[in-house]
Image (spheres, rainbow, N blue to C red):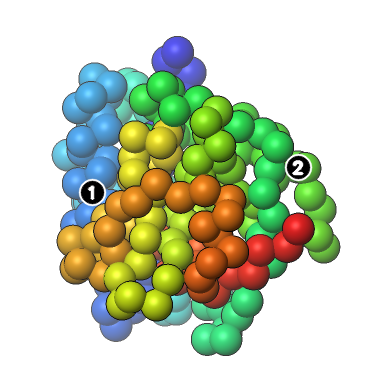
Amino acid sequence: MTDFSLIETMRYEPEAGFVRLGLHLARLTRSARRLCFSGAAAAEARLREAVSDAEGALRVRLTLDRQGVISVTTAPFAPLLADALWRVRIASTRLDSSDRLLRMKTTRRGVYEAARNEFSSAEADEVLLFNERGEVCEGTITSIFLDEGHGVLKTPPIACGLLAGVLRTELICQRRARVARLSAADLRRGRLYVGNSLRGLIRAELVV
């Protein structure tokens, strides 16, 4: 399949700049190399050009296609409240752990859209996906983290079939998270979080 683009979605703050920019560019470059996409080297310049006159926080979305064409769009960003609690549900849609493209952030989002569409926005703020073996993988737009009270979060390994999320990578590198296979039962044994680079960690409540 070649009819997709790579995506990076990040937050820009006028005083601090792009949040986790280095990790976003590293993931984009790595994915582009593996898929033989050209043009990743121009991404940082295009991002900085897009926010050159920004006066407030922005959600910034960059896409890179196989021909090396980069597109950058921006929109105002409003952070969640510090005590935000997202209601999450488990989708019947399953991820295929052998699909290596799941490890990269792309516009090929059919499986995530199918999972999201299983519940209305009134029923769930986020929907969690498992793989064909019943292992916890990720949310439709977030990585999953579990706090069992030991000081280090658990997050599913890439081998389960999930995106190498930028926030996830940062927390692992900081030794604030470690990889561990998780089941549905595990999610009820600790404090659950979902999160991404745009919004950070979000407290979550599993609704059944």
The total of numbered circles placed on residues is 2
- Is 90 situated above or below 4? below
Seen at 73% across and 62% down, the residue is 207
Q: Which mark is residue 25?
A: 1
Give left or right: position of 150 versus 23. right
Residue type of the residue flagged with mark 1: Leu
Give the secondary structure at mark 1. Answer: helix
Q: Residue furthest top?
A: 1
Q: Nearer the viewer, residue 96 or 154?
A: 154
Seen at 60% across and 80% down, the residue is 84
Quadrant where the N terminus is found in the figure:
top left
Q: Nearer the viewer, residue 178 or 141?
A: 178
Q: Which mark is residue 117?
A: 2
Q: Quadrant of residue 52?
A: bottom left
Residue type of the residue flagged with mark 2: Asn
Seen at 34% across and 44% down, the residue is 157
Alpha carbon distance from label 2 to label 1: 30 Å
